[in-house]
Image: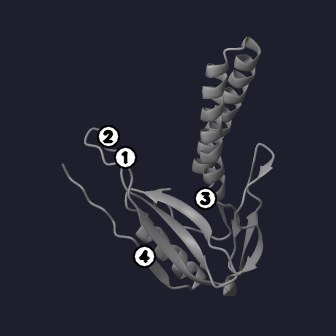
Amino acid sequence: MTQAAPIALPYRFDTSDVWHTILKGAFGLNALLLLSLVFAIFARPWPVALGIGVMELTVLGFTRIFVRNQQGSTGTLTSDRVEVEPNTLLGIALPGPRGTYTLDRFSAVRVEFRSGPITVDTPSAGPYEIVWLAGKPGTPDVALARTSDRAGRAVGREFGALLRLPVEEVGAPIEIRL
């Protein structure tokens, strides 16, 4: 999201698309390795089957880490509550917030600055921001927007003004010019 128009409530958000793409790739690689393992076992080249089995276990370990640490939410933000839909991919329920939370359960709007890949020849790659609704203890944080082009600060301020919540900034915007 880049800041093009003012944010209006109700605000429909979906910040799960990046992680869904990553997880689809991980699941696809797991399926390919499992299929390869089955073929290798029936063809009886045991060293090849063993090697593919070790690769599958390694990729499966990384896939579990990706699933456990994925971020992103889908839902609707109104002036008095946020409704977060269950985060599912290919019929698999992913961890993360779900349900309806009143806004008094949130302490701030948090803009989290993150660095992206630093390259000289790709001007579109670079830092990005995630705008969160920061939950009080016992309430999960909800990712409202993913921005780029340094729009996170302005988007966070807009959410803060709309929801009457303070705005926090975490991390430092990174500026690299070559």
Question: Marks 2 and 4, how far apart in space?
Answer: 26 Å
Question: Could you tell me the amino acid type at mark 3?
Answer: Asn
Question: Marks 1 and 2, how far apart in space?
Answer: 6 Å
Q: Which residue extends farthest top?
A: 43
Along the polypeptide, which appears first: circle 3 or circle 2?
A: 3
Q: What kind of element bears circle 1? A: loop
Give the residue number, with chain letter if any, for mark 2: 122
Q: Are marks 1 and 2 in contact (CB under 8 Å)?
A: yes
Residue sitting at x 38%, y 58%: 115
Question: Could you tell me the amino acid type at mark 1?
Answer: Ala
Along the polypeptide, which appears first: circle 3 or circle 4?
A: 3
Residue 85 in the figure: left or right of residue 168: right
Question: Could you tell me the amino acid type at mark 4?
Answer: Glu
Q: What kind of element bears circle 4? A: strand
Question: Residue 112, how many percent across, how many down?
Answer: 46, 68
Residue 65 in the figure: left or right of residue 125: right
Q: Which mark is residue 69?
A: 3
Which marked residue is nearer to the observer: mark 3 or mark 4?
3
